[in-house]
Amino acid sequence: MPVNEEAIGKQYPPVTMEIEADKVAEFAWAIGADPHDGVPPTYAAVYCLGATAPQLFGDEDAAVDFARLLHAEQEFEWTRHPEVGDKLRSQARVTTDINRRGMRFVTFETDTTSGKGKPVCHSRALFVIRT
């Protein structure tokens, strides 16, 4: 089971974003939630994964073949849920990169904090890439 030691621990620069009311409302309507109920928990897919995954996918050294990628797992752990107007900072890293049986398994974790540096959410994604 070959491990890509160079990739493990690679950290990407932080990405900052503000939770915007219009974007939250669009997202809420798309998933059948009421925008007046606040930021849906699954909006973490936007500020955690959506904000940082393009860094991994665009990293030539990471060599992720997007055409062969399957987003296999996703989980979020919240310290608190953000509110509209919050400014968040998300920073991601590769925590595992293993090849076995013609498949590459990459675990990509993101920590999101508030503008004051307080924890908001931890995201863990597993990408399976056919090699």
Image: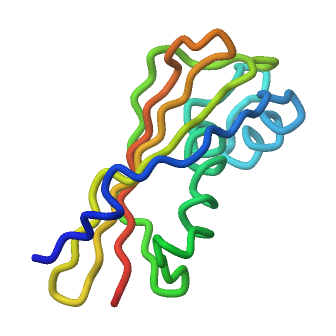
Residue situated in front as seen by the camera: 101 or 63:
63
**Which residue is depicted at the point 65% across and 44% down?**
46
Query: Does residue 74 appear anywhere in the picture?
Result: no
What percent of the width, then of the height, locates residue 103?
A: 26, 83
Residue situated in front as seen by the camera: 29 or 125:
125
**Which residue is depicted at the point 48% across and 76% down?**
64
Q: Is residue 114 left or right of residue 111?
A: right
Quarter of the image for the N terminus: give it.
bottom left
Query: Does residue 65 appear anywhere in the picture?
Result: yes
What is the count of numbered marks? 0
Quarter holding residue 101? bottom left
Q: Is residue 6 left or right of residue 41?
A: left
What percent of the width, then of the height, locates residue 15?
A: 68, 39
**Which residue is depicted at the point 82% across and 35% down?**
25
Q: Is residue 94 above or below residue 2?
A: above
Q: Is residue 128 left or right of residue 20?
A: left
**Which residue is depicted at the point 47% across and 78% down?**
63
The residue at the far left in this view is 1
The residue at the far right in this view is 22
What percent of the width, then of the height, locates residue 104?
A: 29, 77
Residue situated in front as seen by the camera: 49 or 91:
91
What percent of the width, then of the height, locates residue 129?
A: 38, 79
